[in-house]
Image (spheres, rainbow, N blue to C red):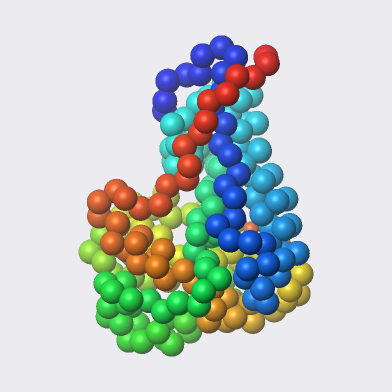
Amino acid sequence: MAEPPSPGTTAMFSLPDLPYAYDALSPVISDDTLHFHHDKHHATYVKNTNDILQQAGKSFASLEEVVAEAHKAGDKKLFNNAAQAWNHAFFWESMSPETQDPTGDVAEAIRSAFGDHGALKEAFVTEGAGHFASGWVWLVADTDGAVKVISTHDAADTLTEQGLTPLLVCDLWEHAYYLDYQNDRKQFLTKWFEALPNWSFAGAQFDARANGGAYRFDAPSRSSVSA
Ligand code: FE2
């Protein structure tokens, strides 16, 4: 934990902007869905995290620390909000308006683990479609560079898993797809995997897994608040 905040000062995490326009992922994800998802759902998780920390008089140097400490302490309310704030920011980075193919070392790791890109798609869609209730489906790499597909429940993420670096994530909560696909999560995941994965980002994550350079949420800003 970082130093406690001085009186009248608190560390506030900010809602990150989407790295593209709201209509940039259409038709796979509509403008309406992105507005609700980012401006309402994600914004609420960030606000709740800030509110909980402020009420508790706690200050952390990073959102990653908040997630780890809340998990260790069994503080479910803080963990759920902080992890969801992080997961959504990572989700936005996991998508690109430009359809891409994996290249470089991550492409080689996918071939080694799955055989070909189609088999990875099958594994990713099957894992996500079969996941019970809300959560996230991830492509992750271990420290040796072996890649695999996993899913996590509710707000759970890979920050609390030793030795795993997330490469890509897709949101399995109904708010991610219900406006566009109703209850057809499998169709959402299929369209998502075919068009939206940001393989440049996944490749950078793969390359950074062992050197501490993987994605981090923006550090909090310190601002004066009235008591
Ligand atoms: Fe979401």
Residue 35: give x, y in percent of width and height. Answer: 72, 58
Q: Nearer the viewer, residue 32 or 84?
A: 32
In this rendering, the count of numbered labels is 0
Residue 117 shown left or right of residue 9 in the figure: left
Residue 182: give x, y in percent of width and height. Answer: 76, 74
10 lies above or below 34: above
Q: Quadrant of ligand 1?
A: bottom right
Q: Residue at x 72, y 76 (%)?
A: 181
Q: Residue at x 51, y 34 (%)?
A: 220
Determine which quarter of the picture holds residue 168: bottom left
**Residue found at the far top of this picture:** 7
Q: Is residue 72 visible?
A: no
Quadrant housing the N terminus? top left
201 lies above or below 45: below
Q: Nearer the viewer, residue 104 or 20?
A: 20
Residue 13 shown left or right of residue 37 in the figure: left
Q: Residue at x 23, y 64 (%)?
A: 144
Q: Residue at x 53, y 25 (%)?
A: 222
76 lies above or below 39: above
Residue 139: give x, y in percent of width and height. Answer: 42, 68
Q: Is residue 91 visible?
A: yes
Determine which quarter of the picture holds residue 205: bottom left
Determine which quarter of the picture holds residue 27: bottom right
Quadrant housing the C terminus? top right
